[in-house]
Amino acid sequence: MTADLHIHTTASDGRLSPHEVVRQAELAGLSYIAITDHDTVAAYAELNGYVHNAASRLSIIPGIEFSTDLPRHEVHILGYCIDINNVRFRDQLESILADRLKRSRLIVDKLNKLGYSIDYNRVMDTAGQTRAIGRPHIAKVLVEDGHFKSIREAFEQVLGKNSPAYVPHYKLTPEQVIKLIEQVGGTAILAHPGLIGDDKLVLDLIKAGIHGLEVYHPEHDQASANKYLAFANKYNLKITGGSDFHAIPGRYPEKLGSFTVSATLVDFLSM
């Protein structure tokens, strides 16, 4: 039995709809998935309460991914087994999503001033139905218009943190995110700790009360996975993993089922 506990859909910055993600997961023979869109749980409304399909043996764990407010680092925290219908939780998400819209317009304004002609309406069209508009949608338009060869290049040159067109947005602190996830019955997991680039900060987040680490991730090599597994064992933390799937051509994995973890890790989320 296999699982993928880090998946994005068109409800945020993924390229497949929630239904398409479920279909790919079923075809890949996965036993568990978690949809962890950025700052939104809208995918679950689209799935109309889908929790388990006895025929395909696929179960879905309610999840989300939050960006947090730290001055020099991008730290993401995953929430699992959350109550997606909690009113206060949904109100908090509404505040974050409203700021995403404002931030996106400010980024487009900056890009135009920098000489990258880009139409905000194109960004909105690219984002489709999602209200979780973010830099990946802007990057996609920049690539389509020939300004950059890839989304990664757009981030490296103009959209990444401290880059010319970067605009900060409303975020909760890591401590606030952990508390929010706890308040809706969830488990808070530090996403891809190896991408933070500062293990001292990882240790600080452990002290702040994070419940677990995403040990297994496509951008963690074996040495990194072993290191964060040792961290988890030392501090009695939960262990998870996932593909961070977006269905972006050229970005591994391009298909669900290419990067999986043992379904036994799902047990950590409810212990």
Image: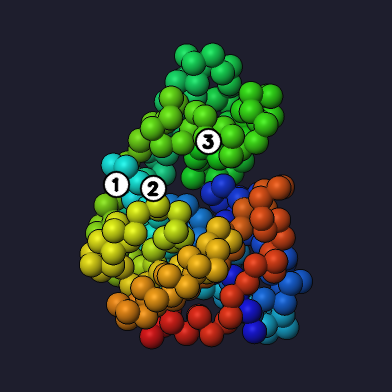
Quadrant housing residue 56: bottom right
Q: Residue 34 at x, y = what percent?
A: 54, 68
Which residue is rendered at x = 45% and y = 54% of the image? 195
Q: Vertical placement of 145 versus 205: above or below?
A: above
Q: Is the residue 241 above or below the residue 144 in the image? A: below
Tell me how far mark 3 sits from mark 2, CA to CA: 13 Å
Q: Left of 170 or right of it: where is 213?
A: right
Which residue position is annotated with label 2?
A: 74
According to the picture, the residue beneath numbered tag 1 turns out to be: 70
The dot on residue 155 is 3
How busy is the neighbourhood of tag 2: few (under 14 within 10 Å), some, or many (20 plus)? some
Amino acid at dot 3: Phe
Please tell me whether mark 2 sits on a helix, a strand or a loop.
loop
Residue 152: tell me if it is visible: yes
**SS for tag 1?**
loop
Quadrant including the N terminus: bottom right
Give the numbered dot on residue 257: none
User: What amino acid is labelled 2 in the image?
Assistant: Glu
